[in-house]
Amino acid sequence: MTFSFIAVPHSGRKPSPSLANLQSEGECFEIAGWQLWLKTWRAESFAALSHVERHQTHVLIGSVTNIDELRVLAATITAEALTANDAAVLHTLHQVYGEAVFAMVEGPYTFLTFGSRGTLAVKTDAHGLQPVHAVSGRSAFWLTSELKNVARCRRDELDFLPEDDVLAHDNRADTFLPLRNGARLRPGSAYSFGSDGREHPVMHSVSYLGHRLAAPQRLRREHARELTYSLLSDSIRSLSRCSGPLSIPLSGGLDSSMVTAIAARHRDDVRTLAIGTGTSNEFPFARTVSRHVRTTHSEQTFTDQEILRGAHEAIYYNEIFDGLSAEIQASLLCLYRTLEGIGGRVITGYGSDLLFGGVLKPGSAPADANPELWRQIYRTRWTGEFSPFGANRYGLDVHHPFWTPRLVAFALNLAPDMKVAADEVKVMLRECAAEHALLPDEIVWRKKIGIHEGSSVNQIYASHIGVETGDYVGKTRYTYRRYRALLSGEDAL
């Protein structure tokens, strides 16, 4: 699978930036006035990733998880879709339904279309799971999934913002990058790039999908429970259809436990892994779930140094500059490292708290619940916490079944009293798990605890930095310093 790319305009009248430093890790192509570098973790021919038709070359970066569903739809247009590659399927749907069809496409992906006269069209996925960045460097204009690779080509191309500007506030647009000369392409959008008469880049964009906070949906509780189960189950069933091993990080909390229980209904070879440290763990709860749904289970205890390495890898590979996000991802990067020799697909319960109220306090005012959750959902569009590159580094294909366009759209505007009550959070998710007999009651009604809290990763990270556990300004300050040093090449892992 292709998971990283750089595209640079290339004119014979203008010197081209050197991609030589990256060629040992991928392949370079000259396409319609652009240089394209692609990185894969399995040997795949360019023909398998692209579709050429009428002087246009379409290239699919990343992984479309509901491609079987889309292929059936495309087959109503042309029978050739049944045997076509994924790029051709998306092109067929785009021809007939326009850019709005990408609202149906799930998973971390970027769809590139190289046209005549040096134009390039880019479709980003709905939630920015596969990020795309535009950088106006000193030597070239770059489109890339990973900023670090631009710096590896030309070390002086990234113009980082001062530290105080990044720490000033947390209310950032989803196009934000901590660069003076760069921006993140907005998730759920279609961009077109070209050049003017002086060969300066010209960009146009339009959103094909934009989640917005709306009036709460007042559904019958039984109807809401059925929709919750149906949407989540469909997502997990689709992700379970993979030829290799299927692994799930299992804490014994509600989110990862529900994902495990539903996956085990679709496959009998699910592997679960519990993560702990020398300070604390949640192993007894994970064992309870594993025994209940009969998975192959193991436990991993990481040292403080391994956790810190995981945090630094999250900063580097997922390009995270936010302290909270780096901390949360630290143990997952440790887990990915242990799975390097096993490979296959990893699915998580990540993101559920933001959809169903796990980050809220019991008794939160219903009028405030959905706006606060939407703020935190929107925040993930620039943090990098859902980026796949850390898992990709270890040969893994990671996915988050709660984080699909249809499930996010449904849960975002679900009535707040179905998320938070006087003494409970994630009310609807718990009722759903109980109604479908997914888990033991002690797991269904277990109190919420964060992944970074259950294994004391938050304390380990704070101790290393020299700040209080809850000091996320201090954690972000440290994280951003490491981000700048690692991405610019001034420091190494």
Image: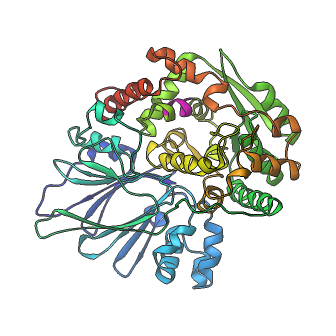
Which image quarter: residue 37?
Answer: bottom left
Q: Nearer the viewer, residue 462 or 79?
A: 462
Image position, residue 209 (x, y; %):
49, 66
334 relative to 55, above or below: above
Image position, residue 481 (x, y; %):
34, 27
386 relative to 303, above or below: below
Q: Nearer the viewer, residue 123 or 405?
A: 405
Q: How is the image coloured?
A: rainbow
Say left or right for 366 vs 147.
Answer: right
Image position, residue 74 (x, y; %):
59, 79
393 relative to 227, above or below: above
Main SS, magenta residues: helix
Q: Give the range drawn in magenta.
A: 326-330
Say left or right for 15 vs 476.
Answer: left
Q: Which residue is drawn at 50% across and 22% down?
A: 308
Say left or right for 365 vs 441.
Answer: left
Image position, residue 225 (x, y; %):
79, 57
Quarter of the image for the C terminus: give it: top left
Is residue 132 visible from the viewing direction of this image? yes
Say left or right for 167 vs 425.
Answer: left
Q: Is residue 393 magenta?
A: no
Q: Which residue is drawn at 76% across and 25% down?
A: 283
